[in-house]
Image: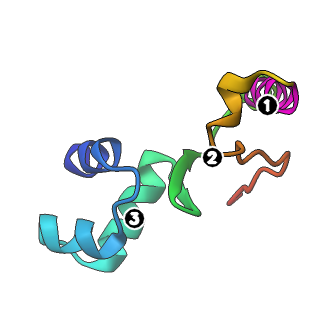
């Protein structure tokens, strides 16, 4: 399991197929490990789904602050892509 965590942390865009072939485990085992590590793939990012309400609110607040800064006329932020923030939390519970 720690090997999968290391792989995920090293490359957030790693696929199940890459994990499976790189570690020599089956797809169902990769799913089990993801569940045990409390992460899920959402788009190209894996996010923890066992956050407390305070952690969720903190993430939403930081995202809103980023969106407000992006919406301002600050030219430094215009060179970056628009941040992807949605207030939607996907829970598997």
Occupied quadrant, residue 26: bottom left
Mark earlier in primary sequence (2, 3)? 3
Is residue 88 magenta-colored?
A: no
Disc 3 target residue: 32
Question: Disc 2 to disc 1, how far (Cα)?
Answer: 27 Å
- x then y, percent, for residue 30: 33, 67
Q: Which residues are magenta?
A: 59-72
Q: Are marks 2 and 1 in contact (CB under 8 Å)?
A: no
Disc 2 target residue: 49
Residue appearing at x 63%, y 36% in the figure: 79
**In the foreground, 50 or 76:** 76
Horizontal side of 37 relative to 74 (left or right) equals left
Residue appearing at x 32%, y 78% in the figure: 27
Question: Disc 1 to disc 3, how far (Cα)?
Answer: 38 Å
Labels 2, 3: front one: 2
Residue appearing at x 35%, y 68% in the figure: 15
Is residue 65 magenta-colored?
A: yes
Secondary element at image label 2: loop
Secondary structure that dominates the magenta span: helix
Secondary element at image label 3: helix
Disc 1 target residue: 70
- x then y, percent, for residue 2: 24, 43
Mark earlier in primary sequence (1, 3)? 3
Q: How is the image coloured?
A: rainbow
Residue 52, above or below 23: above
């Amino acid at each position: 399991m720690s090997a999968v965590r290391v792989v995920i942390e090293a490359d957030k865009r790693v696929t199940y197929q890459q994990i499976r072939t790189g570690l020599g485990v089956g797809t169902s085992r990769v799913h089990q490990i993801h569940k045990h590590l409390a992460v899920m793939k959402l788009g190209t990012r894996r996010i923890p789904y066992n956050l407390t309400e305070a952690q969720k609110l903190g993430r939403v607040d930081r995202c809103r602050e980023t969106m407000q800064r992006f919406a301002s006329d600050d030219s430094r932020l215009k060179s970056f892509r628009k941040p992807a923030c949605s207030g939607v939390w996907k829970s598997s519970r």
